[in-house]
Amino acid sequence: MPSAPLALFVGMPGLELSASEVAFFREANPCGLFLFKRNLDNPEQIRRLCAQFREAVGREDAPVYIDQEGGRVQRLDNGNWPLFRSLGSFGALARKDLELGKRAMRLSTLAMASMMADLTIGSGTTPVVDLARKGTHDVIGQRSFGDDPDLVIAMAREVIEAMLEVGEMPIMKHIPGYGRVSVDPHFDCPVVDATVAEMRATDFRPFAALKDAPWAMVAHLIFTQVDPERPASVSPIVCELIRRDIGFDGVLITDCLTMEALKGTWPERVRAALDAGYDIALHSQGDLAASEAAAKAASPLSSASLARIARAEARRGNRRVDVKAVHDEVEQIFRENGFA
């Protein structure tokens, strides 16, 4: 029986795989590939790249994911595809008319998910369910629906259901919540001093209400009232809190472990994240030597992780919509309601 894939997503630097990268993927067999703008040029190239990776690892269903939330975080933005509004824009529409906002969000997600499915990309790692309140760092900002947990829950539910309907994997982020951060975890480690009771009443609420989501991405920040020593993404205490207190039993993948919020070498971070109990470590920096080092630090997916992944995969549908027509319908909704 073949061994399980490594509990690891990696990146790569270019538009196609080199012979060395193909050999690495064949030997290491990481769970998935995470792509960035540097890897995405046109539809034919993207489909070819995804096929190259899947052939190398020997799994037709091997996941290839990107960040495609809408707004300033959308990697498919070079003119070959329509541009999608930020989640914050849909939140603003929903504050004016909740049902209309929900409808527009579902339609937009159906269009964006159909676009990714056509490219054989399996997820845009969305929705963001962090609360964006006054003082929250701009690293979240318009990526969030807003500061009202009930509105965030309602809108994120539309994204999750629409993604699954099309066969894309929704990944809610960044559990257990970036809503109180005042620094950017790409460059420093945020520290949150709120009590668990305060967090349950606010930042944890959307994640708990959406705990049936198939995947979630784990934040890099220190909750001093939970684990004052380790960031959430490498903390077994926070992992336990996510599983027991928030009640999430889907697939847990870390945010990218090369961010400056974390300490130690990159392979040490991979090992720490998996030792903490998370299902998958995300190491998307993209350099082959770094990916090889990360692979040596990683372990195969556990039976529990494989079962979570299988449950998530079973929820994928196969609907498609006319991307341009539905996107145009969403834009018309915004124009008719006074949004530029």
Image (cartoon, rainbow, N blue to C red):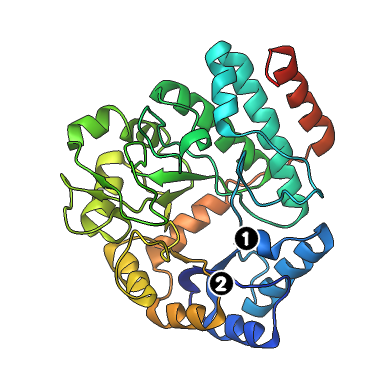
Marks 1,2: beta carbons within 8 A: yes
Residue 51 at x, y percent in the picture = 74, 69
Q: For the point 61% across and 49% down, which residue is it?
A: 124
Residue 267 horizontal side relative to residue 57, left or right: left
Residue at the image point whose x is 35% and y is 54% from the top: 220
Which residue carries the number 2 mark? 286
Amino acid at pointer 2: Gly
Residue visible at 62% across and 38% down? 71
Helix, strand or loop under label 2 = loop
At 34% from the left and 56% from the top, the residue drawn is 188
- Mark 2 burial class by Cα count in 10 Å: few <14, some 14-19, many 20+: some
- Residue 36 appears in which quarter of the rendering? bottom right
Q: Quadrant of residue 178?
A: top left
Relative to residue 100, is residue 174 depicted above or below?
Answer: below
The alpha-carbon separation of the residues under discs 1 and 2 comes to 9 Å
Spot occupied by residue 300 in the image (x, y as percentages of width and height): 43, 75
Task: Give the class, few, some or many, for how many residues have Cα within 10 Å of label 1's Cα (few <14, many ≥20).
Answer: many
Query: Residue 311's x, y, as percent?
Result: 50, 52
- Upstream in the sequence, badge 1 or badge 2? 1
The answer to whether residue 76 shows anywhere in this view is yes
Q: Secondary structure at mark 1?
A: loop
Above or below for 340 versus 272: above
Give the side of residue 193 with respect to residue 171, left or right.
left
Q: Amino acid at mark 1?
A: Phe
Closest to the observer, 221 or 340: 340
User: Which x, y percent locates residue 42?
Assistant: 81, 59
Measured along the vertical axis of the image, is residue 76 above or below residue 194? below
Number of numbered discs overlaid on the protein picture: 2
Can residue 322 be seen here? The reply is: no
Residue position marked by numbered label 1 in the rendering: 36
- Tell me if 319 is positioned left or right of 227 in this view: right
Label drawn at residue 173: none
